[in-house]
Image (tube, rainbow, N blue to C red):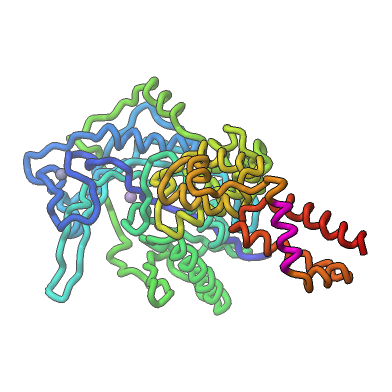
Amino acid sequence: METQILIGLEIHVALATKTKMFCSCSTAFGHPANTQVCPVCLALPGSLPVLNRRAVELGLIAALALDAEVYPSMQFERKNYHYPDLPKGYQISQLGAPMAERGRMTFTGDEGQEETVRIRRAHLEEDAGKSLHTAEGTLLDFNRCGVPLVEIVTEPDLHTPGSTRVFLEDLRELLHRTGVSEVRMEEGELRCDVNINLVAPQGGTEISEVKNLGSFRGVERALKYEVARHREAAKRGDRLRHETRHWDEDRGVTVAARTKEESHDYRYFPDPDLPTVTLDRPWVHKIRSSIPERPRDRKLRLEKEYGLSRYDAEVLVGDGDLADFFEEMASRGADPKTAANWVMGDISGYLNAHGVRLGELPVTPTDLVRLLQMIDADQISGKIAKDVWLIMAGEGGSPDEIVQQRGLGQISDDSLLEDLVSEVIAENPDVVGQYLGGKVKAMGFLVGQIMAKTQGKANPQLVNAKLKDALEKIQGRR
Ligand code: ZN
Ligand code: MN
């Protein structure tokens, strides 16, 4: 029997509101320190909090998207602790009567296995400020004080560092797709505490907790480090203490936090300034029915409905805009496989190369469907279509206009192509001789010559057929 690894997560996500949880200060990121503060979020005496309705709505979307049970009412409580970046001396959070409990999220683990993680609870709370440790001393920025968060707590249902990372990636996608959060990792909009329990076969559990991880790669590395550390200790016969540790990204190790930070008694109690919030059932129902299709459901549907491979479905859904564009194309009659190849290949490549988003391009799915129709109708070659696409993406315009204005139409004119074939045969007697002598490959060179003369616009199937005809005739005359 092997040691069992149980991993649980506490995830803090910044909600996509314009203003803070209990005041009208802006939540915008990156502004000069202490320019987005007011008496409420600075906790000046006499100020009173007023709950942001939009924050509740976004929190509910998160809870419902995770299939959690939303309670008819919820209570805000004060979580008391003292830290310089917390001017109130308490954080407004939820404990006894949270927004929602008992959710679940299914995902595909790092080895392709289906896994379900139970969500213990989802509650609302406010963010704290930021301490900046400098040579002159600690500086405080209260701009983040009162920024609305949803805290999502999972049961310890994850078993490997790799699957934990995949779960977090999928969760991030879900929260982004449903509009709960922009989930900008670099702005700290998703932060994660990790609990890892190693249950030895002979009984006995080792627990450690790694706090405040700001990247999924960091989560995976910290967990790998902890698993190895626990195993080493077990080999030595040591018992590890239950402790809180911090991840040191640069050194790639976890280090024990000062014990002071471990022993909290938060003395939670209901915030007397905030009444119990009763959630209007029809409102909750309306929110539930407005939640867009979840990324995982969408992947499965794309596979089934359009016959896409799992990989293709994952790439498309990985960026919801790409999947939207693809589905628009398919609904307008494009062949799904061809449309998927274009979206994942040329379109995606263009976006990456130019650092732009799909919504910023002057191209509609209808334009692209039209481009594909022109290829099918032999009006342009596949190669020319790539050039037309680049013009569409860069300057806009319909493919018909672009092809017409720039003379890019495919040459399918019989007499013109026959003239070109005769011309090329006359100009390359040696190559023709090689072909007639049995070197079949020599024909490729002749085709290339015709394509060059027409700047790639000759219809390749017709060129091949006509060239073959002409060469066979010469053969017959010999
Ligand atoms: Zn404020
Ligand atoms: Mn929290």
Residue 154 percent location from the top left of the image: 47, 48
Identify the residue at image location x=59%, y=36%: 330
Quarter occupied by residue 70: top left
Residue 221 percent location from the top left of the image: 48, 68
**440 or 21, nearer to the observer:** 440
Quarter occupied by residue 273: top left
**53 or 297, nearer to the observer:** 297
Identify the residue at image location x=51%, y=60%: 197
Main secondary structure found in the magenta portion: helix
In this view, 194 is above or below 307: below
Q: How many marks?
A: 0
Q: Which residues are magenta?
A: 417-427
Can residue 98 be seen here? no
Quarter occupied by residue 158: bottom right
> Going by the image, does 20 lie left or right of 444?
left
> Going by the image, does 9 lie left or right of 182?
right
Residue 7 percent location from the top left of the image: 51, 57
Identify the residue at image location x=48%, y=55%: 350
Residue 138 percent location from the top left of the image: 16, 68
Identify the residue at image location x=69%, y=57%: 420
In this view, 365 is above or below 138: above
| Residue 307 inside the magenta-drawn segment | no
Q: Quadrant of the C terminus?
A: bottom right
Farthest-out residue, bottom: 236
Can residue 251 be seen here? yes
Q: Quadrant of the N terminus?
A: bottom right
